[in-house]
Image: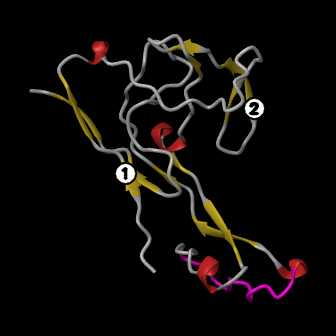
């Protein structure tokens, strides 16, 4: 099996102050009146980081989605022991004495299995002045299953 990894592209700029890059909208239910907060990589709410509702040029409201790879964290991924295909997603080095579980033959034997370890990713140090609560977001890695890099963000010289 070949696992394709996503990665950011190459962005060159002459004046970073003129770039206002955003990730896609994190709100899928149209409710922009509720308070929304940032979450850390483990799913814990960060109460001091209330997210700001922004407005696009066409008047639509949105809250940019946080992408952890852009923050410097490639999160661990998980699969199950449902079958050979799902177990083949385990690409991390197994710890000494650790074995993959047997393929599940019932719901009772179905297990979550760590497929890849969490790693550190280089950030691009792009900060949108309209979203100071989300540093490094907007340019870089997308929100795919496995993101390998943020690409590059370089001034034109």
Of all residues, the one furthest to the front in this rendering is 58
Q: Quadrant of the C terminus?
A: top left
Closer-to-camera residue (26/58): 58
- Is 155 situated left or right of 130 in this image? left
Vertical arrangement, residue 86 with respect to residue 141, above or below? below
Q: Secondary structure at mark 2?
A: strand
Q: Which residues are magenta?
A: 93-106
Callout 2 crowding tier (Cα within 10 Å): few <14, some 14–19, many ≥20:
some
Displayed quadrant of residue 153: top left
- Residue depicted at 38% across the width and 33% down the height: 139
Mark 1 to mark 2: distance in Å?
27 Å
Tell me how the rendering is colored.
Answer: secondary structure
Q: Earlier in the sequence, mark 1 or mark 2?
A: 1
Task: Where is residue 3? Give x, y as percent.
Answer: 44, 70
For the point 67% across and 33% down, the residue is: 28
Question: In which image quadrant can residue 25 be found?
Answer: top right
Residue 56 among magenta residues: no
- Label 1: few (<14), some or many (≥20) within 10 Å? some
Residue 18's place in the image compared with 115, above or below, is: above
Which circle, 1 or 2, is nearer the viewer?
1
Q: Is 41 on the left-hand or right-hand side of 147?
A: right
- For the point 35% across and 35% down, the residue is 124
Q: Indicate left or right for 35 with 3 as reference.
A: right
Would you say the residues marked 1 and 2 are in contact, meaning their CB atoms lie under 8 Å apart? no
The numbered dot on residue 45 is 2
Residue depicted at x 62% and y 32%: 26
Which of these two is toward me, 78 or 120?
Answer: 78
Question: Residue 57: x, y in percent?
Answer: 44, 11
The verdict on residue 95 being magenta is yes
> Element type at marker 1?
strand
Q: Is residue 95 visible?
A: no
User: In the drawing, what numbered circle is on residue 7?
Assistant: 1
């Amino acid at each position: 099996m070949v696992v394709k990894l996503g990665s950011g592209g190459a962005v060159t700029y002459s004046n970073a102050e003129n770039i206002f890059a955003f990730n896609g909208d994190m709100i899928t239910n149209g409710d922009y009146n509720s308070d929304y907060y940032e979450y850390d990589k483990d799913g814990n709410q960060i109460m001091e980081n209330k997210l700001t509702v922004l407005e696009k040029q066409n008047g639509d409201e949105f809250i940019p989605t946080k992408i952890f790879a852009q923050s410097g964290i490639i999160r661990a991924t998980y699969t199950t022991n449902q079958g050979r295909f799902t177990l083949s997603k385990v690409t991390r080095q197994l710890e000494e004495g650790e074995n993959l579980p047997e393929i599940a033959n019932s719901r009772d034997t179905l297990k979550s299995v760590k497929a890849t370890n969490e790693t550190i990713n280089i950030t691009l140090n792009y900060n949108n002045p309209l979203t100071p609560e989300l540093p490094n977001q907007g340019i870089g890695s997308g929100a795919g299953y496995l993101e390998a890099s943020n690409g590059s963000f370089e001034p034109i010289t």
